Image (cartoon, coloured by chain):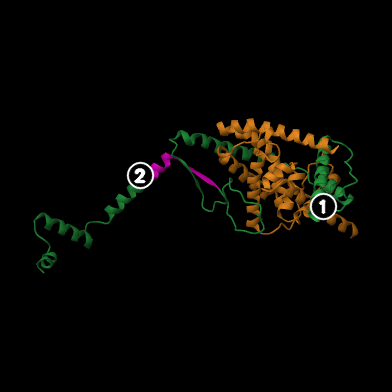
Chain colours: A green, B orange
Amino acid sequence: MTLPIGDRLEAEALLTDHYLDALLAANDRHAQDAPSDPRLDADLRRAAAWLRSSLTRVHPSFRFEERLAARLAEVAAGLRLAPAAGGEGGSVPFPGLAFDPSQEPGPGFDDEKGRDAGPSRELLIGGALTSAALSIAGAAFVAWRRSRGQGSPMARAVRAARESRALGRLPEVDARRALD
Amino acid sequence: MFWKAGAQEESRRLAHFDRDRLLVQRAQRDPAAFDALYRRYLAQVYSYAYYELGDHHEAEDATERTFLLALSGLPRFEERATPEDGEGASTFRVWLFRIARNVVANQRRARRRHPTAPLEAASTTADPLDLEARTTERAAAADAWAAVDRLPGDRRRALLFRFVDEMSTAEIAGVLGRSEGAVRVLIHRALRSVARDLRSADER
């Protein structure tokens, strides 16, 4: 009996999977011999053994490891402090945030296509920082208003209208319109 | 023999769940405790990034981003895996490698080119002064990397997760968002491509 192509492929894939389980387990035991299964193609077994011995795990430098550990500790300390500062601090992404880690790329995801994405960093803004920014903005607005001076035509017109209202008479133009 | 190996793999995977669960819970209560998870998975994440990107500095950058994103996203992570959940259950490692996969994919897209130089020294040797052994291992790693780098996206990733990070099919399925059957076929096809490359290299 011959299997349909799809089923045959799945059966072969299952055989390969079992072989790889055995190969990796043998490696964990530091076994000298690689497992052999005559049902699996010899070329596949050879390729698996070659990849097993060539694709070894790589360790980053100690310097990098410690530098990143320090950076993570810094961020962790910030995360612990953020709720203590009033809890109103939020996580604001830098422009060009690449993605949300919880987002699923989906099965059709392919890194050879798609959009370019810039580096992603996050900035924590606490309540204190927000209120300081608002104070600075308020002071700047008052200074700007004062710097505009009293002599602008609009300011003069407003002042004249207010004074005439206070004296109980309409400005000339409005009085004429009222008579019409 | 295969069943025995499968059972060993399964028990190893479940032990892995338990170890992670405690560390994750501690890190969720106190972010400073994330350091233990970082130390446990640093080499795995770095290796994956290194073989995907083929460059030491880019791998460091991807590793850094992965762990920073994981740390900031940890409060939202839910460890749901229990031994009863069986295969395909969610684990911290699966979640972490999903982040790594996205970070690496973004870097590859941003770069839009493959490195022209072969992979640097990829393996650690027992004796660092054994230059001949080092050279041979470097050449083997560079050849293997070149063969893997020629594979299309998910076949390449699946192969790296299986060989470099020693993930089970269920874990790879979790990272790639595919069924276990699809992952087995991906790996099988990837291995066939590598075998073809090896055969044609022999004939030359």
Residue at image location 85% in from the left, 54% down from the top: B198
Image coordinates for residue B189, horizontal then vertical, percent: 79, 53
Depth check: B112 or A42 in front?
Answer: A42
Say which label, 2 or 1, has the lower sequence index: 1
Q: Is residue B157 visible?
A: yes
Q: Chain of mark 2?
A: A
Question: Which residue bears the numbered disc 2?
Answer: A135
Residue B110, image x and y in percent? 62, 56
**Which numbered dot is residue B140?**
none
The kind of secondary structure element at disc 2 is helix
Rounded to the nearest angstrom, the CA distance separating label 2 from label 1 is 71 Å
Assess whether residue A142 is covered by the magenta stretch. Answer: no
Chain of the residue that carries numbered disc 1 in the rendered image: A
**Where is residue A30 shown, x and y percent of the image?**
84, 36
Q: Is residue A129 magenta?
A: yes
Type of the residue with mark 1:
Arg
Report the front residue among A70 and B87: B87
Is residue A60 visible from the viewing direction of this image? no
Query: Mark 1 packing: few (<14 Cα in 10 Å), some, or many (20+)?
Result: few
The percent position of residue B33, horizontal first and vertical second, equals 60, 32
Q: Nearer the viewer, mark 2 or mark 1?
A: 1
Q: Amino acid at mark 2?
A: Ser
What are the residue bounds of the magenta stretch? A121-133
Q: Quickly name the residue at label 1.
A: A8
Left or right: B151, with A156 as reference point: right
Q: Residue at x 76, y 54 (%)?
A: B118
